[in-house]
Amino acid sequence: MMRGLLRGGRILSESVAELAGICEGEWIVGEVADTGPGIPPEEQPLLFRRFFRGRASHRQGPSGTGLGLAICKEIAELHGGRITLESDGIPGHGSAFAVWLPRAPAEPPPA
Ligand SMILES: Nc1ncnc2c1ncn2[C@@H]1O[C@H](COP(=O)(O)OP(=O)(O)OP(=O)(O)O)[C@@H](O)[C@H]1O
Ligand SMILES: [Mg+2]
């Protein structure tokens, strides 16, 4: 899932540390960042729609389906979580995605 969020870049070391599971209150947050083309602000509301392919896909060519992020979003939401995105859209500044998942209850539910 985290690989599906990245493009033209690498997982930054500090983000890998966060992947190990940073707890923000009731949430576990996994963050990945790349050094790729970034995502323009006007594309950001469309990005998680099925079959949407944006500016960065022009480099990628026809190989993608536009389903990767929609699937990631659905997986996160099925776990009661969500995905957030930060990018200023400037090529080379990259993009950062965070996957927020609710922490499991400390006590297992009664049998
Ligand atoms: N890390 C990223 N950096 C820049 N643009 C991105 C990034 N991830 C996704 N995008 C943009 O969002 C669009 C949708 O991404 P998505 O992963 O859903 O589809 P895709 O990569 O085109 O195809 P695939 O279904 O093979 O993943 C991409 O076409 C691209 O324009
Ligand atoms: Mg993809």
Image: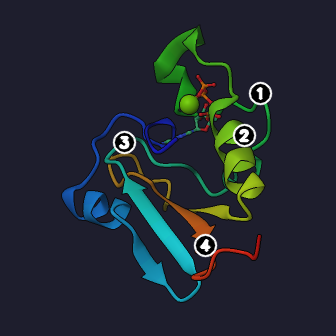
Q: Is residue 68 visible?
A: yes
Q: Which mark is residue 36?
A: 3
Give the amino acid at mark 4. Answer: Ala
Q: Earlier in the sequence, mark 4 or mark 2?
A: 2
Q: Secondary structure at mark 3?
A: loop
Q: Earlier in the sequence, mark 3 or mark 1?
A: 3
Mark 2 C-beta to ligand 1 under 8 Å:
yes
Q: Nearer the viewer, mark 1 or mark 4?
A: 4
> Distance of mark 3 from mark 2, alpha carbons?
20 Å
Q: Nearer the viewer, mark 4 or mark 2?
A: 4
Q: Residue at x 42, y 62 (%)?
A: 31
Give the amino acid at mark 1. Answer: Phe
Side of 58 where 68 appears, left or right: right
Give the amino acid at mark 2. Answer: Ala
> Distance of mark 1 from mark 4, alpha carbons?
32 Å
Q: Which mark is residue 51?
A: 1
Q: Residue 110: percent from the left, percent from the top?
A: 75, 76
Split into quadrants, the picture shows ligand 1 in the one at top right
Q: Secondary structure at mark 1?
A: loop
Q: Earlier in the sequence, mark 1 or mark 4?
A: 1
